[in-house]
Amino acid sequence: MARRVPLSLARALYSVLAWAAQPLLRRKLRRRAQAEPGYGQAVAERFGRYTPPELGQDGRGQWIWIHSVSLGETRAAAILIRALREILPGMRLLLTHSTATGREEGARLLEAEGANGDLQVWLPWDTLAATRSFIAQFRPAVGVLMETEIWPNLIAGCANAGIPLALANARLNEKSEAGALRMAPIARPAYGALAAVWAQTEDDARRLRHVGARVDGVLGNLKFDVRPDEAQLARAAGWRLKLAKPVLLLASSREGEEALLLERLKELGAAAHAVQWLIVPRHPQRFDAVAQLIVEAGFTLSRRSQWTEEQAENQADIWLGDSLGEMPLYYGLAAAALMGGSFAPLGGQNLIEA
């Protein structure tokens, strides 16, 4: 069972800062919505104002709550959700996110699942008022946070309301461990209040214990169980047969990496045109900026969003993968891939997708 978490002086100060930061959060959401309209949707939910859901006969709504912050976590959560449906076929899923890409992927997941009564909302900002409103509104039977999401007020609120909250597919790198230790008066009670923690690796488990979590097991990474979209792979195989050149993919590129690649391609001159280059940025808000970089570097550009469904564009120097949820298609097209996040000490992006 979850332990009760009193309001310490440290968490009270944290709560004041979270409350004071709300105008900055609103400004950030407005700015991000210019590039990703999803950030402008249902903004009131971020501050704890939700449309009342239909509740079950017992008044608890029978919600199984899963929080997956962004795209990758939502894809991993899909594996967990399908397993839960086999065990609890009548469950009602409450799915929360923090990013627009996560919410978009979650909407696709719920549509594919076709289950009635499921609900998708934003996770509230971690103020006392917003988290209390979220808990009072939905009263989930149990909650699961995916990977790294530690919010002190949310965790304390669930513990004090008797809602078991688990951290699944949990990971903690050295940098995050150091940050949690610096913020120990806030972080340690939060980690300690989790009802269960399942780590990805033994190193993650060791670091999680160091910051106060009680690790129940090391179960590996759920992302290894994600199955690539067969329809996308089939489409990629068909398109590859029509291509005159092999495709080299820069996958999930981070800021600065595209510029490095473009510089090297210019140095190569005609040799750079021996293959078809495909760049897929990690973050969708950078699609337009990367497109501009490519054009300014003197290369012709074709964007995935402008392709037909019959075949890939075959005339441009560089393709830009400016779509979400199509990494199986891009990897299926590629003869080889360069992994984004590996040109700088960022740990690299998801090798499992390759």
Image (cartoon, helix red, strand yellow):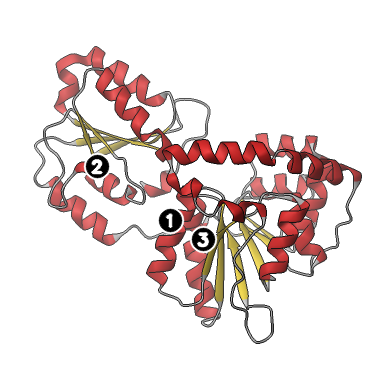
How far is the residue under mark 2 from the one under mark 3?
27 Å
SS for callout 3: helix
Q: Which quadrant of the view contains residue 285?
A: top left
How far is the residue under mark 1 from the one under mark 2?
18 Å
**Camera-side residue: 219 or 34?**
34
Q: Which quadrant of the view contains residue 335?
A: top left
Crowd around label 3: few <14 · some 14–19 · many ≥20 (10 Å): many
SS for callout 1: helix
In percent of width and height, residue 171 lies at 62, 48
Which residue lies at the image location 60% right of the left edge and 54% below the top edge? Answer: 44
Instruction: Check disc 3 and report the residue beneath it.
Output: 77
Q: Earlier in the sequence, mark 1 or mark 2?
A: 1
**Above or below, comparing residue 23 to residue 169 in the picture:** above
Q: Earlier in the sequence, mark 2 or mark 3?
A: 3
Instruction: Check disc 2 and report the residue beneath it.
Output: 304
Instruction: Check disc 1 and report the residue beneath it.
Output: 105
Q: Can you see residue 322?
A: yes
Which residue lies at the image location 74% right of the left edge and 42% below the top edge? Answer: 18
303 left or right, relative to 77: left
